[in-house]
Amino acid sequence: MLAGRRVIEAQNITVHYGGGSIRRTAKVTALEDVSLSVEAGACHGLVGESGSGKSTLGRVLLGLTAPNRGRVAIAGFDPARLARRQRPAFCRSVQCVFQDSGTVLNPRLSVGRSVREGLDIQRCGTRADRDAAVAALFERVGLSQTLLERFPHQLSGGQRQRVNIARALSVSPKVLVADEPLSALDVSVQAQILDLLHGIQRESGLTIVLITHDLKVAQEICDTVTVLEAGRTVEHGRADDVFANPKHSTTRRLINSLPTPKFA
Amino acid sequence: MFAPMAEPLLTVAGLSVSFDLADRTIEAVRGVHLTLEAGEILGIVGESGSGKSTFAKSIVRLHGPPFTRSRAIIGGSIRLATDDSGVELVGASRETMRNVRARQIATVPQDALSGLNPLIPIGRQIAEALRAAGMPADRRRVLALLEEVQLRNAGRRIGAFPHQLSGGERQRVIIAMAFARAPRLLIADEPTTALDVTVQAQILMLIERLRERHGTAVLFITHDLDVVASLADRTAVFYAGELIELSPTRDLFLHPRHPYTQALLASRPGVANGKRLMGTAPDLAAAAPGCAFAPRCPHAAPRCEASPPPVFHKNGFARCWRVAA
Amino acid sequence: MALALARPRARSNAGLWLAGILLCALVLSGAFAPMVAPHDPNAINMLSRSAPPVWADAGTWKHPLGTDNLGRDLLSRALYGIRTSFAIATLGLVFSAVLGIALGLISGLLGGVVDRVIMGLVDVFITLPNLLLLLCGIALLGTEIWVLIIMIGLVRWEAYARLVRGQVLTLREEPFVEASRALGGSRLRVALLHILPNLASPLVVMLTLSFPLVLLMEAGLSFLGVGVQPPTASLGRMIGDGRDYLIDAWWMSGVPSLVLVAITLLFQLIGDGVRDRIDVRAHG
């Protein structure tokens, strides 16, 4: 399964925040010399505690943060050095889903309109084609057509997250970066969203980078994982191996901190 | 640990909480009965909107201005056993409630920042809690409390402001304020949801220690079933404002009786091929005559929608036609 | 929890409606002053000089609110005054809002040098006393009505620029803006589709609350004699004209003052009401 070609190759990524020469803010290292490689069609987990740099790495992959050092190749692009005319193609290839926070969708747009946005930007077909495509996307993520005209605040957290996934899928990306897509959702809804992501990955060969603090989630759907701590990689490999035989003390600590039933 | 003959610490009978909104009335909690023994940890689980949080807040009456914008209408009875006799909390005077909050019942919110005053150093806030409970509040005592909850460099950080601490450290300060009062009851509303697993493990340990040291009973509200399994003696499951199952934690997890509990357990991430819970929770403004879970229940029969399910009492209870049969 | 969304039973809207109706009545009677005014506002009649309002001794229904020292009908002048003052204030407000919103958007979205230059200008305009700025402008450009409008705009734009820039800085970090960028959305698209509509509520509140401020600004200038020039009626001008007659004919200043207070108060009430009611999430 993991013998395919690599769709993400990141080498020696370093990201600093602050450290300005004028204001003399303290320099904070968010990522230090982190490398990452992900096979096409795999689900790769970035796990770690808050402040471990996992979200920063996700932003680097999306081109939202430029690394101070290091090179990224994702779906054939370098997000930090995109030529203007490459941008549309890059955006079609790499998409993102964020944590549901109430502002993950524009509160002033109907959710159908939000999902159509990618198609509008990429100028796909006529208006009628796009509306039909949006309806199909709603179907695919398990949302009723009656919700198309609703506004984000009229939806539940789980429904919003489905809309969010539909928006990302609208441009048929090769890579999906999902940053804590399950946080802030109920456990039962988490499972539904997880199943949805898993199903999409299997049926369309999408590569998923799943950023999560929840080891159980990573364990359930990830093929490979990278464990980060304080901006450095402490362990990476096949998910089964890492969770069954954690080599690094940080990984062990994370696993041992998981609540265990009193009665087991 | 449990004094067998004594009155339970907390006796909740027929508790209902509703909110009057502009266009409708929401019944957030409906007819809840339960008892809590001294020193017991009771886990309360349910999805958002299930009423678990409202239930807990109604005990200390953290509803209505200034805490929330709309006033809660509380019916039924909440009896708290105290040294002399007991107090009825529903309809109690403000003075009584203030006393109860200062000495008997401590709360730990999800967001510790909202539980602390941003403008006052943490040491002074703990001293305040001591004084409110009628205890001397000198620096030595405050420091001892901070060390009890294992705040690193407690001596240097006694004068720190809440924003200078991490989320986990703020939660420790809140728990130190609870230790200060040696309360009979601690109400913890999703206290570890925003924290990393390693910090969560430490906070849970502190709560256990509070129970051991002072015999404090704990109402632990969470949506994380694994946390409940690791901590609670008994577990209560809320659905659509009703308490639908209450069992010793071990029994609840190994032999869930109510179909909702079964579905909830099967929906945990990490439970492969579980029969996931589908659909969404019902609207609290429109109460159905029968079982609230019937529309989502895989075992629903005509009688489930027609009339309210009977309560089956044995080693806790479950409210379901199927269990009773 | 669902309860976080719970909103209290809406307070009675009666007060807000009453204020709205009264304000509309005042504005409409000003707008249609030529049709409703009983007299020519500038017609001098030395025979009925300083006639008191109808409720005072010797008052007559011919001049319900009395006349001024030149025998001009105060009711008619007040109606025309509302018309002039409202026109100047509205146009000044629109000019300042357009200028401020545009510069705030540019500043917040482009950042860097552009942002620093615009924010530097904002600082300069905050530091300069409003009155000084207005007087300088009028001294240089004259007392035409369009000069007043432009100067009011120049005095007020910084408030909008600061509000908009602040909101833009928050909004542009929101996940829905980042998602749009990740879908390939241009900066113009982000500004027009995602940022501007989400600015609407704070802007509406600010506009309603700052209207009375601008109205008073115009009145102040006209009171000082550097605003609207005679014989055109404006509320400030009328108050200024009457100040020498306060003891013998208090109504000369009193009538326009009451009108001004009424308008300001009504606007303030409506502004507060709107602010309490506006909620992005609740209205979509």
Image (cartoon, rainbow, N blue to C red):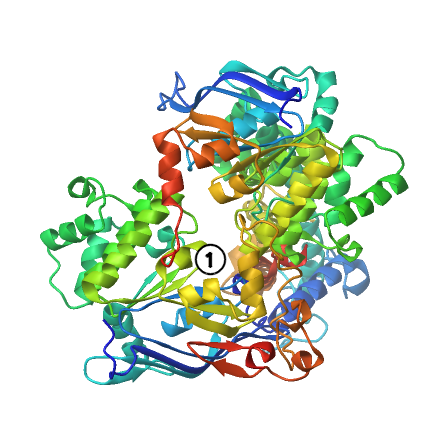
Could you tell me which residue is drawn at 39 percent across and 16 percent down? A21
What element does badge 1 sit on? helix
Q: Is residue B311 visible?
A: yes
Quadrant showing the C terminus of chain A: bottom left
Q: Which residue is mark 1?
A: B225
Q: Is residue C74 above or below residue A104?
A: below
Q: Out of B202 and A96, give the one closest to the viewer.
A: B202
Mark 1 crowd level (few <14, some 14–19, many ≥20, 10 Å Cα): many
Q: Out of A98 and A37, give the one closest to the viewer.
A: A37
Could you tell me which residue is drawn at 45 percent across and 36 percent down? A244
Q: Out of A2 and B83, give the one closest to the viewer.
A: A2
* Image location (x, y in percent) of residue B323: 56, 77
Q: Is residue B117 visible?
A: no
Q: Is residue A245 above or below residue A18?
A: below
* Image location (x, y in percent) of residue A255: 40, 40
Could you tell me which residue is drawn at 22 percent across and 41 percent down? B152
Quarter of the image where one finds residue B197: top left
Left-right relation of C253 to B81: right
Quarter of the image where one finds residue B248: bottom left
Q: Is residue C211 above or below residue C51?
A: above
* Image location (x, y in percent) of residue C213: 56, 50
Left-right relation of B86 to C233: left
Q: Amino acid at mark 1?
A: Leu
* Image location (x, y in percent) of residue B134: 15, 68
Q: How many marks?
A: 1
Chain letter, disc 1 residue: B
Quadrant showing the N terminus of chain A: top right
